[in-house]
Amino acid sequence: MDTMLQTCATVRGPLRRPYDVEAIRQQFPVLHQPARGRALVYLDNAATTQKPRAVIDRLQCYYLCENANIHRGVYALSQRATDCFENARRRIAHYINAPDPRQVILTRGTTESINLVASSLGRLILRPGDEILITWMEHHSNIVPWQLICQQTGAVLRVAPINDRGELPLEEFGRLLSDRTRIVSLAHLSNSLGTINPVRQIAAMAHQRGAVVVVDGAQWVAHRKTDVQDLDVDFYAFSGHKLYGPTGVGVLYGRAELLERMPPYQGGGDMISSVTFEKTTYNELPHKFEAGTPNIAGAIGLGTAVDWIEEIGLDAIAAHEEELYDHATQVLGAVPGLRLIGTAAQRASVLSFVLEHIHPHDIGTVLDSEGLAIRTGHHCCQPVMERFGVPATARVSLACYNTTAEIDALGAALGNVIRMFA
Amino acid sequence: MSELRELYQQVILDHTKRPRNFRTIPDTANVAEGFNRLCGDRITLYIKVENDRVADIAFQGAGCAISTAAASMMTEALKGRPLAEVEPLFKRFHAMVTSPPDQEVDDADLGKLAVFAGVREFPVRVKCATLAWHTLKAALDHKSGQVTTE
């Protein structure tokens, strides 16, 4: 037992500086396996990132020596699990510079976070004829929850257009903001185009009209620093599994005064102070929004994931990824007949493309046969596909462990695709 | 790479680049649309039945190499056939593309369609190979609306 606890305490090893991508790769066991008989080249990081050994070990450690239900046991094991869980919340709050861990609600992921805001805030503030403004580049999970609450409240969904580069023109956006706009919800970084939206500027514009600002940060948080206070947004949603953490855990950061006023999202255990058949008093933040036993191991694993990132340094990761991104843009640009979908001046991590006369699905299958994992399809962004007149795209998305050699392998493999279908 | 060549055989690539019966049939009520949500493939299938035979069959749409070739080769295989043979042929075809890769293919009656046996190695592509067939069934049943591969 003592040995086990000791192992748990020392799962994180020191990293060499400057940025040593090989040392980082060594920490990701999944990368060191063959795929279709070749070295695996994992370029589908916008779907989910791989997990470093530190996170995997932390999950195992929790189940080996800390597992108990939280917030209710009088015994030491439960207290330990509760401490680990709440400590993870503090580290996650620190990672996004939330002023108070109570403003960090742990959910199942970005989708549940957005559904929580849409449902709870929607019921609090929306009246018939009120407007919700989203953008054309949103993931389905930042469209459908708003459609649902519109149906329930009589509010109207407005969509800000994007231009041919996949950018959000702010004049157009500003024109769609009105005194009826109650909520503005948009992606920080587009999962299908790679566009970075000027969130701080948009938040200021929306606040001027009295609207609440919700940000889908699923694609952003693993790539650039997130400071919810500096951005001055009201809600910020993201997932653990795109941040080198486990699946099934995510975050909703919220402005305290709004969270205090909002009704609960789900009812159950842990979210109450007292229950009688006549009246139930809800628990305080953040527990009011965390009904039922949460993904305890997942949250603790996510705490380890953000520690792991901070140890390497998000600035160092961003610099590495920017270099890779430029290289990938060049390599893809040299492929004949390739068209990038999404050429915004400010973009990161994601490169979406189509090849003339070759369906993305066929590209994906040929690349797979050479060990390269990329995503093909509509990326849960059907309006974006329609906007660009394509049924689907092939998408490459980068993470801290990708290398220029992998991008070169991608370029060579795309050459093979063209030869096969030419 | 050999599995890949098995999937994208020359005959399949040929039908992808030059799909046969790629047109409409204006004077028929047997029309259906098929849609593969996973990859966004869309197909419109037209079939004209006379004296319980497939008098004419054609398709239009946009899709991946496998779904385009499957639709093209299906139209070639069915043109002129008795209607009664359509369903059994689909069953054989479906059984072939979903059978375990190590199992021997029973390609009796399948003719040229046997080239799709390579799809067995790529389970996610089965929907591509069968989209046209599912759509055909809807067209014959006069089902209105859209067929999906889900």
Image (cartoon, rainbow, N blue to C red):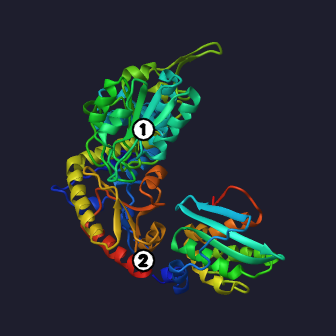
Mark 2 and mark 1: Cα distance apart in space: 44 Å
Above or below, A339 relative to B49: above
- Residue A268, can we see it? no
Quick one: SS at disc 2? loop
Q: Residue at x 77, y 81 (%)?
A: B81
**Residue A273 in picture, x, y percent from top left:** 52, 18
Q: Is residue A283 left or right of residue A21?
A: right
**Kind of residue sitting beneath label 1:** Ile
Residue at the front extreme of this rendering: B27
- Residue A36, can we see it? yes
Q: Residue at x 47, y 54 (%)?
A: A386
Other residues around mark 1 within 10 Å, as few (<14) / some (14–19) / many (≥20): many
Residue at the right extreme of this rendering: B51
Q: Is residue B120 left or right of residue A100?
A: right
Q: Which mark is residue A134?
A: 1
**Kind of residue sitting beneath label 2:** Gly
Q: Which mark is residue B120?
A: none
Q: How many marks?
A: 2
Q: Is residue B131 left or right of residue A161?
A: right
**What chain does mark 1 sit on?**
A
**Residue A121 in picture, x, y percent from top left:** 47, 26
Say which of B23 and A159 sits in front.
B23
Q: Residue at x 59, y 80 (%)?
A: B20
- Please report whichever mark, 2 or 1, sits nearer to the chain's N-terminal start: 2
Q: Which residue is mark 2?
A: A37
Above or below, A80 relative to A278: below
- Residue B136: quarter of image: bottom right
Can you say which quadrant of the picture contains the C terminus of chain A? bottom left
